[in-house]
Amino acid sequence: MNGLAAWLDAGDRLRASIQRHDIYVYLRAEEDVDDTADARADDALAALEERLGDRIDAVVASLGARRLWTMAAATPRLARYRYLLSQSLARAAHRLSPGESRAIAQTVEPALAATGASYKALRRAALAWPSPAASASDARRDAFAARWSPFERHEDAFAVQLLTIVNLRNGIARLQGFDGAPAAAYFAQSLAPASVRCTLAAVRSSGAFRAYSGVRVTIAAKRLGIAPEAVRAWDRDAVTAFTPPDRPFDEARKEILDAERPMGEAYASAFERLLDPANRRVELCVATACDTTGFSVGFAGSESGVYFGGYRGSVNNVRAVAHESGHAVHKQFMNEHQPIAAYNEGPQFMFESFAIFNELLFYEHEYESAAGNAERAYYLNRFLDDATFQVFGSAEETDLEARIYADAEAGKLRTAGDLDVLTAGVFRQYDPLLAAEPAARVYWARDSLYFTDPLYDVSYLYAGLLALKYFDDFERRQPGFAKNYVALLRNGFDESPAALERKFLGIDLDDEAGLVENASALIARRTRTLAELSAAGGI
């Protein structure tokens, strides 16, 4: 019985070693988008870690629950792997047979890989197509049109790719014993389909986004000198004339650190160590070959860091650095305090909730330190835009994607036109002003995650709800919040998400309506402040 514990210990060491190698080749590949050798090595290491997980699942499945828990009760060394073993047992019910696995590897996986590569090429070609000529009379309208026109022009090709991905993934999920790909994806994130449905229903019934949109429409109408009913979706950003200057990274670094300090010494000092140039844990990739993206790296046995390509100093750049820095700090906390490498990995919605919380802290700091009403309105609007997108935008995307999979399974989706009609119907339930714009019907083609990381948007939905709950507790100076929050980050994922959130922060993940109500109330309070700033003038 100690042999199983020793075997799991060896597997955990191997997992950490694979991740260290993967961090190295992944960084090299991102530093040069033409570096196909390191990109292939990254894929191979990811496949190796997946094989390691599959091997553990196979052994656990062969033992069965009764024998496994008998062994665990008699072997103290197995106690720390209890959650890992319980997760493996849960996956055992959905394991494919060797023949099914071979068939998928030989047929479905190559088709998905080819479709993924074709999508990337199509997207590059679509975005490279010349945009319609802009007019000086309505720059906002033209910018809006430019975001949609590449996808309108190529929507038939995008539809072929998306429906191929959807049908293949639905087929795999059915073989695994799920009702469809959404249920399989939710299971992988420790979410239940019923919980997702309940959350979406609560978001749809909330009036917080419509109230925020209404205030933006009122302000935009006033500033543009038009009637509120004449305001279009692209006009809602005309909340203030303030335009922040771009800022060098040293200034952005200081702003991020100032935003984190109210969370206390333990949290702020982790950001200081990360962002200190002397520690060389931040790479601003400026070469022409760099991938213009941002991400964090870090795992058990390796120091965490941040990569950012294409930094130009915009507010959105600084927000993204704050987001990725939040990921890196979380990974470093786990590296220093969680002894089991497997528990450095967990549901993506929890990872994202920690990162989004730092976006909100950044916007809050900028708002609090703003010089006048126009600047305050700008950053308050950015806060609200971020908060509402994380909850209402992610719900909209999650709802649409789930319905795409369900309707494809039912044989109702065959063309781009079918996808357009479905999209318009879903969007009317969340953002009627956007849904009224004909171009918005191709949102399904514009959401790159539908193609590159299917069914990931649900992670942002739950992450947004949690991040707003964290921020609400922070803003209300909830006793012990900062200390308990850091303890959660250090702990890693040795229990279910619901158990962890309840244990450290007293958050009930099973109260979906309560989480939505909390987020809606916070958004409503800040929406009223935005309206008051407008009434005071000077924005």
Image (cartoon, helix red, strand yellow):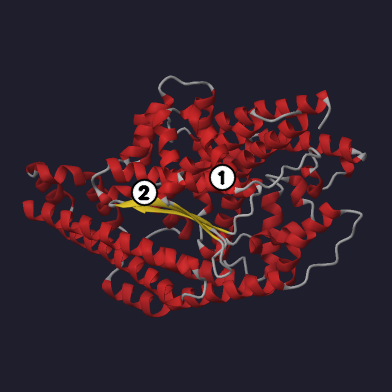
Q: Can you give x and y, in whole percent of width and height, for residue 406 in the image?
A: 54, 59
Q: Can you give x and y, in whole percent of width and height, for residue 510 in the image?
A: 43, 35
* Quarter assignment of residue 539: top right
Let me know if residue 81 appears in the view: yes
Check disc 2 and give the amino acid type. Answer: Gly
Mark whose residue sits in front, 2 or 1: 1
Q: Nearer the viewer, residue 297 or 219?
A: 297
* Quarter assignment of residue 41: bottom left
Q: Nearer the viewer, residue 296 or 453?
A: 296
In the orientation shown, which residue stands out farthest toward the bottom?
106
Number of residues whose C-alpha sits closer than 10 Å to that of mark 1, classed few (under 14), some (14–19) or many (20 or more):
few
Q: Is residue 171 left or right of residue 239?
A: left
Q: Is residue 225 above or below residue 320?
A: above
* Quarter assignment of residue 38: bottom left
Q: How many marks?
A: 2
Q: Earlier in the sequence, mark 2 or mark 1?
A: 1
Q: Can you give x and y, in whole percent of width and height, for residue 113 in the image?
A: 47, 75
Mark 2 → mark 1, Cα distance in angstroms: 33 Å
Check disc 1 and give the amino acid type. Answer: Asp
Q: Can you give x and y, in whole percent of width and height, for residue 427 in the image?
A: 69, 50
Q: Is residue 380 above or below residue 480?
A: below
Q: Is residue 17 above or below residue 391?
A: below
| Residue at disc 2, secondary structure | loop
Q: Nearer the viewer, residue 268 or 378?
A: 268
Residue matched to label 2: 346
**Which residue shows up at 52% across the image and 64% down it?**
452
Q: Is residue 511 above or below residue 73?
A: above
Let me know if residue 189 appears in the view: no
Residue matched to label 1: 250
**Which residue shows up at 44% across the image and 58% down it?**
179
